[in-house]
């Protein structure tokens, strides 16, 4: 049995704490997903990441608090203006708090994400974040997933108790979306300068994206000091402009997540690696974080993703347990023994 020597050299360095550079990541991403090299890559990333994160995992939850035709016009998203699959709607504050409690009352949630459209009511988001902060357990952090921010807004969110923000300069931003890469990157800087954790992701990955594109996108998150890195595939959503391009397999997604895990070894700020949507393959190849979801979901055609594409908290916990993780990390830094059910 012969394995590509360049792969073994890259993995040996990673095992010693030396992350692969961009060109080396391109090499790792160029192997066929069914190849022996891909399997070895995933096994090595799993071993190295478990050692790095002490075999601890995290569960995160996201509430989609509103839907409307979005000015971002992302061609892969069910909310994009011009092809939106939903009528405009928004959850009331009481509904948001009810869902926040349902997600967090068991105490397993590391962070709760509040997701808006690209264009959003900033003052309403501040009020919601403040109300949620006073409702959920103290060990659960608050993160926003929203549109571009200016410096003042970043500081206000942090002052309101928001711990982090999910924000991405996506693959083919400006071509497959109506947004500008430069503005997206400015917001990444605003988030970190405000003292919030940056949640980043290589997404939304489709069959057409090259190893070079993927590597470039991975390193944007690393260069901005992301607290969490991730890989997410583009989900086939009928009726969206990019649906005809198809969808990659979970195995290919897992290979990419493994490269993200190894590349992020050079980013001291990175404390977790996520794979989305949650799957066991990714959790055995370098990822240690999964998301539960309720409310609106840009990858879904159901008005409420709960019980549809969205994974439940209990299912996330069980998936992490089955993947072999032994500890569950909370937002306050404490680690509890991971069980497949509530204890």
Image (cartoon, rainbow, N blue to C red):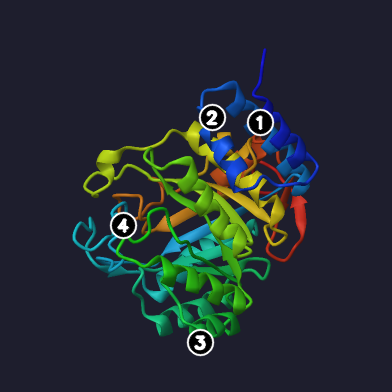
Q: Find disc 3 in the rendering and name its residue.
A: 152
Density class for disc 1 (Cα within 10 Å; few <14, some 14-19, many ≥20) is some
Find the distance from the CA under tag 1 to the CA under tag 3.
45 Å
Residue at position x 61%, y 26% from top?
Answer: 37
Mark 4 or 2, nearer chain start: 2
**Which label sits in the foreground, 3 or 2?**
2
Compare residues 244 and 114 and report the one nearer the observer. Answer: 244
Q: Is residue 107 above or below residue 9?
A: below
SS type, badge 1:
helix
Q: Nearer the viewer, residue 160 or 219?
A: 219
Disc 3 versus disc 4: distance between alpha carbons? 29 Å
Is 290 in front, or is 21?
21
Q: Which mark is residue 161?
A: none
Residue in the foreground of this view, choosing between 185 and 154: 185
Q: Which comes before the other along the chain, label 1 or label 3?
A: 1
Mark 2 neighbour density, 10 Å: few (under 14) some (14–19) many (20 or more): some
Q: Which mark is residue 7?
A: 1
Mark 1 or 3: in front is: 1
Q: Is residue 58 left or right of residue 334?
A: left
């Amino acid at each position: 049995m012969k394995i590509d020597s360049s792969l073994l050299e890259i993995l040996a360095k990673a095992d010693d704490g030396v992350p692969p550079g961009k060109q080396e990541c391109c090499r790792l991403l160029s192997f066929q997903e069914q190849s022996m090299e891909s399997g070895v890559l995933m096994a090595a990333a799993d071993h190295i990441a478990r050692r790095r994160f002490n075999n601890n995992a995290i569960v995160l939850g996201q509430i989609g608090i509103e839907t409307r035709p979005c000015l971002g016009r992302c061609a892969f998203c069910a909310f994009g203006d011009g092809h939106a699959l939903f009528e405009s709607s928004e959850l009331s504050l009481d509904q948001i708090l009810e869902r926040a409690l349902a997600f967090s009352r068991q105490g397993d949630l590391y962070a709760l994400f509040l997701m808006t459209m690209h264009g959003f009511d900033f003052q309403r988001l501040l009020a919601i974040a403040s109300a949620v902060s006073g409702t959920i357990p103290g060990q659960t952090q608050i993160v926003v997933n929203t549109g571009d921010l200016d410096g003042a807004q970043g500081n206000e969110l942090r002052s309101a108790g928001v711990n982090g923000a999910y924000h991405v300069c996506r693959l083919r931003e400006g071509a497959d979306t109506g947004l500008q890469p430069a503005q997206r990157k400015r917001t990444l800087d605003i988030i970190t300068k405000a003292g919030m954790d940056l949640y980043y992701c290589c997404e939304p990955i489709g069959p057409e994206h090259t190893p070079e594109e993927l590597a470039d996108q991975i390193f944007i998150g690393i260069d901005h000091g992301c607290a969490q890195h991730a890989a997410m595939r583009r989900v086939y959503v009928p009726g969206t402009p990019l649906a005809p391009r198809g969808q990659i397999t979970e195995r290919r997604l897992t290979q990419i997540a493994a490269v993200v895990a190894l590349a992020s070894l050079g980013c001291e700020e990175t404390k977790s690696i996520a794979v989305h949507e949650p799957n066991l393959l990714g959790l055995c190849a370098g990822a240690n974080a999964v998301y539960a979801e309720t409310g609106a979901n840009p990858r879904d055609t159901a008005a409420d993703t709960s019980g549809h594409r969205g994974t439940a908290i209990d299912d996330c916990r069980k998936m992490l347990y089955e993947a072999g993780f032994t500890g569950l990390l909370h937002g306050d830094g404490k680690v509890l023994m991971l069980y497949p059910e509530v204890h």
